[in-house]
Image (cartoon, helix red, strand yellow):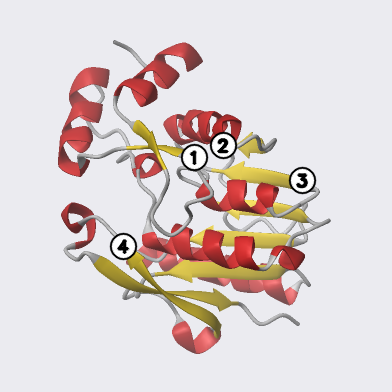
Amino acid sequence: MTSDSIADRRHFIAENTVVIAPPHTPELRLHLATEAIELWHKTEEDLGALGLPPPFWAFAWAGGQALARYILDRPELVAGRRVFDFASGSGIVAIAAGMAGATSVTASDIDVFALEAIALNAGLNGVTLETSSSDVIGRLDIEADVVLAGDVCYEQPMAGRVTDWLAALAAGGRQVLIGDPGRSYLPRERLESLAVYEIPVSRALEDAEVKRTSVWRFPGA
């Protein structure tokens, strides 16, 4: 098997996931992996691409579930507005925004497998959205009223770059929300807490069965 075409990538996703509802967003159905470690190895072996990005798209991470839940419960945050979902992964947050009535939704991820997973998952939920593979960190010309980011502070170098950029977008007048399950590199002192959830997670991924997960807002100008 190769990853040369959309059909190949979609076949790989379909063969290695099942369609299920994430525990904290039962309204949604997503292609998700049930065996974390096996898929990590299978991705490298089957595609013959050592060093391929880990399949973050195959899991409903706690930060994304919390942010999606927050949006579904408060559709007025995105209804009639343009939404940009950064590091979209499975697309759970972008899809929630579409279901909540956003005028347009762009799901951004640099992993081409994520883009195909997002497209498949959007179709499962009857949501229309755009996808983008561009590296947008640092860009302040994002065409959106609301910027969303689920669980992006798991690595120190990336967390610093991303949160500086998100803070700049907020200072420019956009509503910027982030979902985070207590990652070490989240700059809590720069954020306003909006909600806290107890999210069921995979012990293989998180070394826990439940993660206390918060939704935060970057203060605007």
Along the polypeptide, which appears first: circle 1 or circle 4?
1
Q: Residue furthest right?
A: 80
First reached walking from the N terminus: tag 2 or tag 1: 1
Q: Is residue 5 visible?
A: no
Is there a contact, CB below 8 Å, between mark 2 and mark 1?
A: yes
Considering the numbered disc 1 on the image, is that residue within a helix, a strand or a loop? loop
Q: Secondary structure at mark 4?
A: strand
Judging depth in this view, the residue of 63 and 220 nearest the camera is: 63
Front residue of 5 and 39:
39
Q: Which mark is residue 104?
A: 3
The numbered mark, 4 or 2, whose residue comes first in the sequence reads: 2
In this rendering, position of residue 76 left or right of residue 136:
right
**Quarter of the picture holding the N terminus:** top left
Question: Pointer 2: what residue?
Answer: 133
Mark 2 or 3, closer to the camera: 3
- Point out the tag, 3 or 1, that comes first from the N-terminus: 3
Image spot of residue 80 (x, y percent): 83, 56
Q: Which residue corresponds to the image point at 52% horizontal and 42% vertical from the top-left?
A: 109
Residue topped by disc 1: 110
Locate residue 13: give its quadrant.
Answer: top left
Categorize mark 1 by other alpha carbons within 10 Å: few (<14), some (14-19), many (20+). some
In which quarter of the view is residue 61 placed? bottom left
- In 3D space, how far apart are the residues under numbered discs 1 and 4 (Cα atoms)? 27 Å
Q: Amino acid type of disc 1?
A: Ile
Q: Which residue is mark 4?
A: 200
